[in-house]
């Protein structure tokens, strides 16, 4: 846990984390390199179209990263987005809003097969697909993350404010 005093909350099975939206995030202990095959998945609820990251991949474990991709976020449009970097930002987006204060299971998968492709799922239903490879750098996964400030509907690098399991 970084920076804030995030709390835990009882949930569907076990406990989740509540982030304050100001400076809370959790990062992986180990770094990962050349990640082309990945699945980002989180169960969350929010009523806010905040444009904030749920989880993603950054070159630094803490602080302000200079490279970041493999993101899952709720945009300022209330839709769920998944993005990865392949010389340009590749973004796939849900059809409908998830900022409805209901629980959602969000999953984005990416495979390197056939030049790379990704699929975004909401509550088990495929909502969007896209093709291209992903960034091959070394980094850490962050929940409630930090950087998104140059991606799609995101204009500020802030934490996701809501409950996740």
Image (cartoon, rainbow, N blue to C red):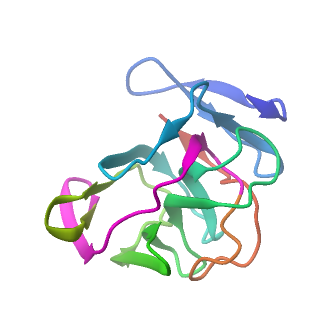
Q: Is residue 156 left or right of residue 109?
A: right
Magenta stretch: includes residue 139 = yes
Q: Residue furthest left?
A: 114
Residue 125, position in %: x, y? 18, 61
Which quadrant holds residue 27?
top right
Q: Is residue 162 left or right of residue 32?
A: right
Q: Classify 30 as above or below 18.
A: above
Q: Is residue 90 left or right of residue 3?
A: left
Judging depth in this view, the residue of 145 and 113 nearest the camera is: 113
Q: Classify 44 as above or below 89.
A: above
Residue 99, position in %: x, y? 50, 66
Residue 101, position in %: x, y? 50, 57
Judging depth in this view, the residue of 129 and 75 nearest the camera is: 129
The residue positioned 50% from the left and 37% from the top of the image is: 32
Q: Residue furthest top?
A: 14
Residue 133, position in %: x, y? 33, 67
Quadrant location of the N terminus?
top right
Q: Classify 74 as above or below 46.
A: below
The residue positioned 33% from the left and 47% from the top of the image is: 38
Q: Is residue 106 left or right of residue 130?
A: right
Which quadrant holds residue 81?
bottom left
The residue positioned 76% from the left and 60% from the top of the image is: 158
Count up the numbered dots: 0
Q: Classify 13 as above or below 134.
A: above
The residue positioned 65% from the left and 60% from the top of the image is: 67
The residue segment tinted magenta is 121-146
Magenta stretch: includes residue 61 = no
């Amino acid at each position: 846990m970084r920076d804030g005093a995030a709390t835990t909350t009882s949930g569907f099975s076990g406990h989740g984390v509540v982030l304050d939206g100001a400076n809370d995030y959790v990062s992986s202990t180990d770094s990962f390199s050349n990640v082309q095959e990945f699945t980002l998945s989180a169960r969350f609820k929010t009523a806010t179209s905040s444009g904030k990251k749920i989880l993603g991949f950054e070159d630094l474990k803490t602080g302000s990263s200079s490279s970041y991709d493999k993101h899952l976020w709720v945009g300022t449009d209330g839709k769920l987005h998944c993005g990865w970097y392949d010389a340009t930002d590749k973004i796939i987006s849900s059809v409908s809003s998830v900022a409805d204060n209901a629980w959602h299971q969000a999953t984005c998968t990416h495979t390197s097969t056939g030049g790379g492709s990704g699929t975004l799922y909401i509550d088990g239903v495929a909502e969007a697909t896209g093709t291209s490879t992903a960034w091959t750098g070394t980094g850490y996964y962050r929940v409630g993350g930090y950087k998104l400030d140059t991606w799609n509907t995101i204009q500020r690098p802030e934490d996701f404010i809501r409950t996740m399991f």
